[in-house]
Amino acid sequence: MKRKVIYVRGMVLLLIALCATFIGCGKKEGVTKDGYADKLYLYNWTEYMSKDVLDLFEKEYGIKVVESTYESNDEMLAKLVAGKRGTYDIAVPTNFFIQAMKENDLLEPYDQDAMTNMKNINPSYLDAAYDPGNVDTIPYMGTVALTIGNKKMLSDLGVTINNVNDLFSPALKNNIIIMDDNEGIISLALEGLNYDPLTNDEKQIAETKKYMLDLNKNIKAFPSTADGRTMLARGEVAVGHIYGGDAAQAMAENSDLEIVMKDAPISLSVDCFVLLKGSKHKKEAELFINFLLRPDISAKLTEEFPYVCVNDAAKDYLSDEILNNPACFLPEDLLDNIYFIEEKSPEVLSQEVNIVTEIKSAR
């Protein structure tokens, strides 16, 4: 009898263990009526994909997109390098991280015949130096780094901002935010030092540390994208150097905000869809990306995330507010000052990380 009890308990424990294992592995994937896997896995920036769009895709094709998010290119790359291949099908790196992904053998070329909606992309964003012929990348949205100011607050402070060095005004003490982005911080300092923001000169880049340390007294925070947008919209700070999409949303919420430093160099980067090596759902991933390139779907995404729209065909579906938003469709006076962010050497990237870490820790 005692042995029988032990046996039953052992069976119960075994069943619990098997159930736990089964649950931990997740529900087994099924197949749609069209023969697709019913799930695919997207690794994306936070606040960069509409739930409504994901729901529309699932309704149309029966495929659920399981999304995980990251806050920086560095975080994305580190996780993909260290992680198990096949965990994700699609990622959305910025153009200057494409080479690093290639060097780590993370990219899977896509079937160009499957991308019938690539024709909707503005040719200016295709065949770029980081991916000639668009073998591995498909443009999603562009991002400019803009400096915006609260005209009422600046007027009350008696401050006019025409260039980076105007940010050193004592009246702006604890009144500036700068996006938490290594490239954005270093480029801003290089501009203030009258150096090429694309330089790989390590001596010039080293000078940015002192420049930004001197500016620290005027910097309130290096916030996340959402926090920075909120601080500007609420009038908590007078000036922000932030991503264009966040600038657009903040300006829509607060009419006192406007772009300043219009004659200064403005960086442009492009976030791209890539297929990941080891993907278990390549055809589903290609179907999803092509779906996102449809003009009506691209318009929905641009309305929700007003970054630089690279999809010309989407214009017919967009509101006048978005079409006239300088962060989504760059006006001529800004286009003249645009420069495309390029990949920097690993040594320079490491140097920038160290400099920014010191700058932020010194506050």
Image (tube, grey):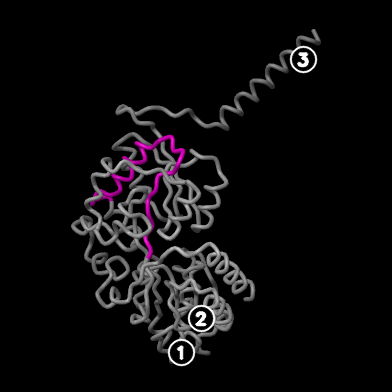
Cα distance between the residues tagged 3 and 1: 80 Å
Front-lying residue, 347 or 30: 347
Image marks 1 and 2: residues in contact by CB distance under 8 Å: yes
The image's mark for residue 6 is 3
The secondary element bearing badge 2 is classed as loop
Within the image, what quadrant is residue 284 found in?
top left
Against 238, residue 169 (above or below) is: below
Q: Could you tell me which residue is drawn at 68 percent across and 16 percent down?
A: 11
Estimate the x, y position of residue 290 in percent, counting from the top left. Answer: 29, 45
Tell me the tag on residue 175. Answer: 2
The numbered mark at residue 157 is 1
- Of callouts 3 and 1, which one flags the residue occurring earlier in the amino acid sequence? 3
Picture quadrant where residue 2 is located: top right
- For badge 2, the amino acid type reads Asn
Q: For residue 195, which numbered disc appears in the image?
A: none
Q: Is residue 76 left or right of residue 131?
A: right
**Range of the magenta residues?**
269-297
Q: Which is nearer the eye, 184 or 126?
A: 126
- The span from disc 3 to disc 2 (Cα, nearest Å) is 70 Å
Q: Amino acid at mark 1?
A: Leu
Which quarter of the figure is the C terminus placed in? bottom right
Q: Residue at x 47, y 65 (%)?
A: 344
